[in-house]
Image (cartoon, rainbow, N blue to C red):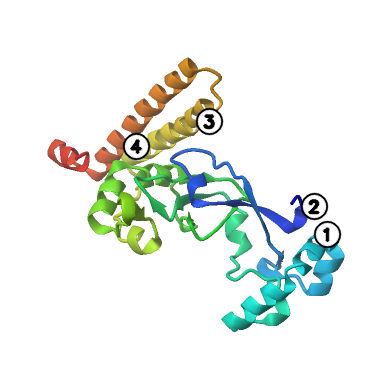
Amino acid sequence: KDVIIEKGLVKPLLMGDDVKKFQVPVFVNYVIYPYKLDKNKTVIFEEKELSTLYPLGYKYLREFKKELFDIRERQKTNTQYWYSCHRSRDMNVFEQERIITPYASLGCNMTICPVGLYHNTKVYSLIPNDEREESKYYWLALLNSKILWYFMRNTGYVLRGGYYTFTTDYLSPFPVRTIDFNNADDKQKHDTLVSLVDQMLTAQKDCRAAKSDNDKKLHEQKISMLDKKIDDLVYKLYGLTEEEIRIVEG
Protein backbone atom coordinates (compact mmCIF):
# COMPACT_ATOMS: atom_id res chain seq x y z
CA LYS A 1 0.00 0.00 0.00
CA ASP A 2 1.01 3.62 -0.46
CA VAL A 3 2.00 5.43 2.72
CA ILE A 4 2.47 9.17 3.18
CA ILE A 5 5.28 10.07 5.59
CA GLU A 6 6.94 13.40 6.27
CA LYS A 7 10.00 13.94 4.07
CA GLY A 8 12.19 14.89 7.03
CA LEU A 9 11.84 11.44 8.59
CA VAL A 10 12.97 9.41 5.58
CA LYS A 11 16.35 9.12 3.89
CA PRO A 12 17.21 7.86 0.39
CA LEU A 13 18.75 4.41 0.78
CA LEU A 14 21.35 2.79 -1.48
CA MET A 15 21.60 -0.98 -1.79
CA GLY A 16 24.63 -2.89 -3.06
CA ASP A 17 23.28 -3.23 -6.60
CA ASP A 18 22.84 0.56 -6.82
CA VAL A 19 26.60 1.16 -6.72
CA LYS A 20 28.40 0.91 -10.07
CA LYS A 21 31.86 1.88 -11.29
CA PHE A 22 32.23 5.65 -11.79
CA GLN A 23 28.44 6.10 -11.98
CA VAL A 24 26.32 8.51 -9.97
CA PRO A 25 24.21 6.24 -7.72
CA VAL A 26 20.51 6.00 -8.51
CA PHE A 27 18.31 4.99 -5.58
CA VAL A 28 14.76 3.62 -5.52
CA ASN A 29 14.47 2.86 -1.80
CA TYR A 30 13.93 4.98 1.30
CA VAL A 31 14.38 4.24 4.99
CA ILE A 32 12.70 5.75 8.04
CA TYR A 33 15.56 7.20 10.06
CA PRO A 34 14.33 8.58 13.43
CA TYR A 35 17.58 10.36 14.28
CA LYS A 36 18.96 13.88 14.19
CA LEU A 37 22.31 15.63 14.48
CA ASP A 38 22.71 17.40 17.82
CA LYS A 39 26.03 19.17 18.35
CA ASN A 40 27.49 17.03 15.59
CA LYS A 41 26.34 13.81 17.27
CA THR A 42 23.73 11.37 15.98
CA VAL A 43 20.92 11.07 18.54
CA ILE A 44 17.54 9.37 18.37
CA PHE A 45 14.32 11.35 18.59
CA GLU A 46 12.49 10.93 21.87
CA GLU A 47 9.08 9.36 21.26
CA LYS A 48 7.12 12.50 22.15
CA GLU A 49 9.32 14.61 19.89
CA LEU A 50 8.94 12.08 17.09
CA SER A 51 5.14 12.06 17.35
CA THR A 52 5.00 15.86 17.42
CA LEU A 53 7.37 16.57 14.55
CA TYR A 54 6.38 13.65 12.33
CA PRO A 55 2.82 12.56 13.20
CA LEU A 56 2.31 10.63 9.95
CA GLY A 57 5.57 8.75 10.27
CA TYR A 58 4.93 8.05 13.94
CA LYS A 59 1.45 6.73 13.16
CA TYR A 60 2.94 4.38 10.56
CA LEU A 61 5.59 3.11 12.99
CA ARG A 62 2.93 2.53 15.65
CA GLU A 63 1.30 -0.03 13.36
CA PHE A 64 4.37 -2.22 13.87
CA LYS A 65 5.10 -1.38 17.51
CA LYS A 66 4.52 -4.91 18.82
CA GLU A 67 6.79 -6.50 16.21
CA LEU A 68 9.50 -3.88 16.73
CA PHE A 69 9.21 -4.12 20.52
CA ASP A 70 9.55 -7.90 20.39
CA ILE A 71 12.66 -7.59 18.22
CA ARG A 72 14.24 -5.23 20.76
CA GLU A 73 13.47 -7.69 23.55
CA ARG A 74 15.00 -10.61 21.66
CA GLN A 75 18.10 -8.60 20.87
CA LYS A 76 18.27 -7.30 24.45
CA THR A 77 18.36 -3.69 23.30
CA ASN A 78 16.57 -0.67 24.79
CA THR A 79 12.83 -1.22 24.34
CA GLN A 80 12.21 2.43 25.23
CA TYR A 81 13.28 3.21 21.68
CA TRP A 82 11.27 0.45 20.03
CA TYR A 83 11.25 2.49 16.79
CA SER A 84 15.05 2.74 16.56
CA CYS A 85 17.21 1.18 13.85
CA HIS A 86 18.94 -2.03 14.86
CA ARG A 87 22.31 -0.57 13.90
CA SER A 88 22.16 3.18 13.49
CA ARG A 89 25.05 4.91 11.75
CA ASP A 90 26.74 8.25 12.30
CA MET A 91 24.79 10.73 10.17
CA ASN A 92 27.96 12.78 9.64
CA VAL A 93 29.25 9.99 7.41
CA PHE A 94 26.21 10.18 5.14
CA GLU A 95 26.08 13.97 5.10
CA GLN A 96 29.32 14.33 3.16
CA GLU A 97 30.60 13.44 -0.29
CA ARG A 98 32.55 10.18 -0.12
CA ILE A 99 33.65 7.08 -2.00
CA ILE A 100 31.37 4.05 -1.77
CA THR A 101 31.73 0.41 -2.77
CA PRO A 102 29.40 -2.57 -2.81
CA TYR A 103 30.09 -5.03 0.00
CA ALA A 104 30.42 -7.80 -2.59
CA SER A 105 31.50 -7.12 -6.15
CA LEU A 106 32.78 -8.77 -9.31
CA GLY A 107 35.51 -6.29 -10.14
CA CYS A 108 36.01 -2.82 -8.68
CA ASN A 109 32.73 -0.91 -8.67
CA MET A 110 33.41 2.21 -6.65
CA THR A 111 32.04 5.68 -7.20
CA ILE A 112 31.49 9.08 -5.61
CA CYS A 113 28.41 9.26 -3.40
CA PRO A 114 26.64 12.64 -3.18
CA VAL A 115 25.79 14.24 0.16
CA GLY A 116 22.66 12.90 1.85
CA LEU A 117 22.49 9.40 0.36
CA TYR A 118 22.34 6.74 3.07
CA HIS A 119 23.03 3.03 2.58
CA ASN A 120 22.51 -0.37 4.14
CA THR A 121 25.17 -2.86 5.25
CA LYS A 122 25.69 -4.04 1.66
CA VAL A 123 27.48 -0.77 0.88
CA TYR A 124 30.65 0.58 2.47
CA SER A 125 31.72 4.23 2.71
CA LEU A 126 35.41 5.05 2.32
CA ILE A 127 36.54 8.39 3.73
CA PRO A 128 40.16 9.56 3.32
CA ASN A 129 42.00 10.93 6.32
CA ASP A 130 41.49 14.71 6.66
CA GLU A 131 45.25 15.19 6.62
CA ARG A 132 45.57 13.84 3.08
CA GLU A 133 45.85 16.40 0.27
CA GLU A 134 44.93 14.04 -2.55
CA SER A 135 41.59 14.56 -4.28
CA LYS A 136 38.79 12.03 -3.79
CA TYR A 137 38.94 11.58 -7.55
CA TYR A 138 42.57 10.46 -7.21
CA TRP A 139 41.65 7.84 -4.60
CA LEU A 140 38.75 6.73 -6.79
CA ALA A 141 41.15 6.15 -9.70
CA LEU A 142 43.34 3.89 -7.55
CA LEU A 143 40.38 2.03 -6.05
CA ASN A 144 38.80 1.33 -9.44
CA SER A 145 42.06 0.26 -11.04
CA LYS A 146 43.02 -3.14 -12.37
CA ILE A 147 45.84 -3.15 -9.81
CA LEU A 148 43.38 -3.17 -6.91
CA TRP A 149 41.26 -5.86 -8.58
CA TYR A 150 44.37 -8.01 -9.06
CA PHE A 151 45.24 -7.46 -5.40
CA MET A 152 41.74 -8.43 -4.26
CA ARG A 153 41.70 -11.57 -6.42
CA ASN A 154 44.96 -12.72 -4.86
CA THR A 155 44.45 -11.70 -1.24
CA GLY A 156 40.70 -11.27 -0.72
CA TYR A 157 37.78 -13.48 0.23
CA VAL A 158 35.88 -14.97 -2.68
CA LEU A 159 32.14 -15.61 -2.55
CA ARG A 160 29.85 -17.63 -4.77
CA GLY A 161 29.96 -16.58 -8.42
CA GLY A 162 33.44 -15.09 -8.21
CA TYR A 163 32.38 -12.07 -6.17
CA TYR A 164 34.83 -10.66 -3.62
CA THR A 165 34.14 -8.85 -0.35
CA PHE A 166 35.23 -5.22 -0.51
CA THR A 167 35.37 -4.61 3.23
CA THR A 168 38.01 -2.73 5.19
CA ASP A 169 39.55 -6.02 6.35
CA TYR A 170 40.53 -6.81 2.76
CA LEU A 171 41.02 -3.27 1.43
CA SER A 172 43.25 -1.99 4.25
CA PRO A 173 46.32 -4.09 3.30
CA PHE A 174 46.33 -2.60 -0.21
CA PRO A 175 49.50 -0.46 -0.60
CA VAL A 176 48.04 2.94 -1.40
CA ARG A 177 50.27 5.16 -3.54
CA THR A 178 50.36 8.59 -1.89
CA ILE A 179 51.45 11.76 -3.67
CA ASP A 180 54.44 13.95 -2.89
CA PHE A 181 53.08 17.36 -3.86
CA ASN A 182 56.59 18.82 -3.72
CA ASN A 183 57.50 16.51 -6.59
CA ALA A 184 56.40 18.04 -9.91
CA ASP A 185 56.06 14.67 -11.66
CA ASP A 186 53.98 13.25 -8.81
CA LYS A 187 51.72 16.29 -8.77
CA GLN A 188 51.24 16.16 -12.54
CA LYS A 189 50.22 12.50 -12.39
CA HIS A 190 47.79 13.29 -9.57
CA ASP A 191 46.22 16.18 -11.46
CA THR A 192 45.97 14.17 -14.67
CA LEU A 193 44.20 11.31 -12.88
CA VAL A 194 41.79 13.76 -11.25
CA SER A 195 40.98 15.21 -14.68
CA LEU A 196 40.49 11.74 -16.21
CA VAL A 197 38.14 10.68 -13.41
CA ASP A 198 36.18 13.91 -13.79
CA GLN A 199 35.81 13.16 -17.50
CA MET A 200 34.84 9.57 -16.70
CA LEU A 201 32.07 10.61 -14.29
CA THR A 202 30.68 12.94 -16.97
CA ALA A 203 30.96 10.26 -19.66
CA GLN A 204 29.07 7.75 -17.49
CA LYS A 205 26.35 10.31 -16.87
CA ASP A 206 26.09 11.11 -20.59
CA CYS A 207 25.97 7.39 -21.44
CA ARG A 208 23.06 6.84 -19.07
CA ALA A 209 21.21 9.78 -20.64
CA ALA A 210 21.86 8.68 -24.25
CA LYS A 211 18.75 8.83 -26.42
CA SER A 212 19.83 6.37 -29.09
CA ASP A 213 21.85 3.16 -29.36
CA ASN A 214 24.39 4.97 -31.53
CA ASP A 215 24.90 7.72 -28.95
CA LYS A 216 25.21 5.12 -26.21
CA LYS A 217 27.83 3.23 -28.22
CA LEU A 218 29.89 6.40 -28.69
CA HIS A 219 29.79 7.12 -24.95
CA GLU A 220 30.75 3.52 -24.16
CA GLN A 221 33.77 3.83 -26.46
CA LYS A 222 34.82 7.00 -24.65
CA ILE A 223 34.38 5.24 -21.28
CA SER A 224 36.62 2.36 -22.41
CA MET A 225 39.25 4.82 -23.61
CA LEU A 226 39.21 6.76 -20.33
CA ASP A 227 39.31 3.53 -18.32
CA LYS A 228 42.47 2.47 -20.17
CA LYS A 229 44.10 5.87 -19.67
CA ILE A 230 43.37 5.72 -15.94
CA ASP A 231 44.81 2.22 -15.61
CA ASP A 232 47.90 3.11 -17.65
CA LEU A 233 48.64 6.09 -15.42
CA VAL A 234 48.08 4.06 -12.25
CA TYR A 235 50.57 1.50 -13.58
CA LYS A 236 53.12 4.31 -13.95
CA LEU A 237 52.43 5.54 -10.42
CA TYR A 238 53.18 2.07 -9.07
CA GLY A 239 56.20 1.66 -11.34
CA LEU A 240 54.99 -1.56 -12.97
CA THR A 241 57.03 -3.11 -15.77
CA GLU A 242 55.47 -4.33 -19.02
CA GLU A 243 55.70 -7.91 -17.75
CA GLU A 244 54.00 -6.98 -14.47
CA ILE A 245 51.23 -5.20 -16.36
CA ARG A 246 50.60 -8.33 -18.43
CA ILE A 247 50.31 -10.34 -15.20
CA VAL A 248 47.87 -7.82 -13.67
CA GLU A 249 45.72 -7.81 -16.80
CA GLY A 250 45.67 -11.61 -16.87
Q: Which residue is mark 2?
A: 4
Spatial CA distance of label 4 from label 3 is: 24 Å
State the CA–CA distance, disc 3 to disc 2: 31 Å
Q: Residue at x 53, y 26 (%)?
A: 206
Residue toward you, 232 or 69: 69
Vertical comparison of 19 with 169: above or below? above
Amino acid type, callout 4: Lys
Q: Position of residue 136 (x, y in %)?
A: 47, 46
Neighbor class of circle 4 (other Cα within 10 Å; few <14, some 14-19, many 20+) is some
Going by the numbered disc 2, the residue's amino acid type is Ile
Of mark 1 and mark 2, the one earlier in the sequence is: 2
Cα distance in 3D space between marks 4 and 2: 50 Å
In the image, 53: left or right of 135? right
Task: Say if 186 sits above or below 209 in the image.
Answer: below
Q: Label 4: which residue?
A: 189
Badge 1 crowding class, 10 Å Cα cut-off, few under 14, some 14 to 19, many 20 or more, is: some
Mark 1 vs 3, N-terminal side: 1
Q: Is residue 57 visible?
A: yes
Q: Is residue 143 above or below residue 54?
A: above
Q: What residue is pinned by disc 1? A: 56
Residue picked out by circle 3? 205
